[in-house]
Amino acid sequence: MATPRRLARIAGCLYLFVAVSTVFAGLVNARVVVPGDAAATAANIAGSETLFRLGLVAELTGAVAFLMTGLTLYLLLRHAGRFAAAVMAVFVAVGVTLQTMSLLNQVTALAVATGRAPSGVFGPPGSAASALLFSGMQHDAYLIAQTYFGLWLLPLGHLVIRSGHFPRALGVLLMAGCAGHLTDVFTRLLAPGLGAAVSPFAMTPAAVAEITFIAWLLVKAVRTPGGPPVPAPAPAPATLP
């Protein structure tokens, strides 16, 4: 059976992969998708098809890695509360499901922009607008999935506090990250203009919390109680009567 230290290292490696793949996919989408400009978006997708596909694969593999991260942390932290650990795993599973399904929009945008969709469905004049529409739907679907990427930090922070493996402040920071994610999601859904302005401030606690947690998992793994074991004194040599 894997030790807590080994589980922490595995979770840290998986979580780091999630972060890198998510950032890469986000940069690809930001480079290719031009908000409000259907012609430029369709041309960018068609002209950078390989890059667009790499971004899609990066997000898909990142989603799988995130699911594995949640399962690994469940094994590591379930001793601190099985119900909270189960809730954490459920939030991760729901978020990953929504994220994965949202990629269908990205696949459709690629098919439309590269002429692989049936022309009778969209027609040449509407292909560019359709590519922009499906790209926007993928972005909005990911925003909805982000709700669960925020919610999972709440039971995770609770478990971190109770586990004894990590500093309590780290758990509080993760719970604050949950509030940041939810603030970002709901302000952007209710008031997009305000949400765009608030987003960098709302997401800062979440980014700091998750980066700190990844670094702790990779560098410190888990905190073991007490110091290194002290060797028992050697027995005194037997004396002859």
Image (spheres, helix red, strand yellow):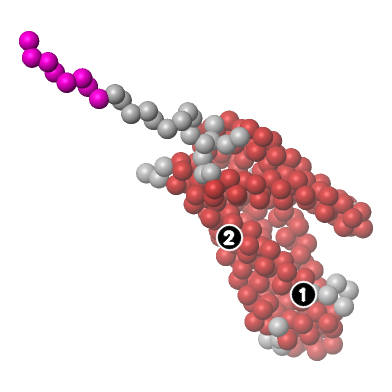
Which amino acid, mark 1? Arg
Q: Quadrant of residue 97?
A: bottom right
The x, y position of residue 66, in whole percent, is 58, 55
What residue is pinned by disc 2?
A: 17
Crowding near pointer 1: few (<14 within 10 Å), some, many (20+)?
Answer: some
On-image quarter of the C terminus: top left
* Residue 130 on image: x %, y %: 80, 78
User: Tag 2's secondary structure?
Assistant: helix
What label sits on residue 31 in the rendered view? 1
Disc 2: CA contacts within 10 A as few (<14), some (14-19) or many (>=20): some
Relative depth, front residue between 11 and 5 = 5
Residue 150 visible, this angle: no
State the residue at coordinates (53%, 44%): 220
Q: Nearer the viewer, residue 100 or 61?
A: 61
Q: Is residue 229 above or below residue 62?
A: above
- The reply, left or right, for residue 154 in relation to residue 122 is left
**Residue 102 spot, x, y in % from top left:** 69, 64
Instruction: Check if residue 238 falls in the magenta segment.
Output: yes
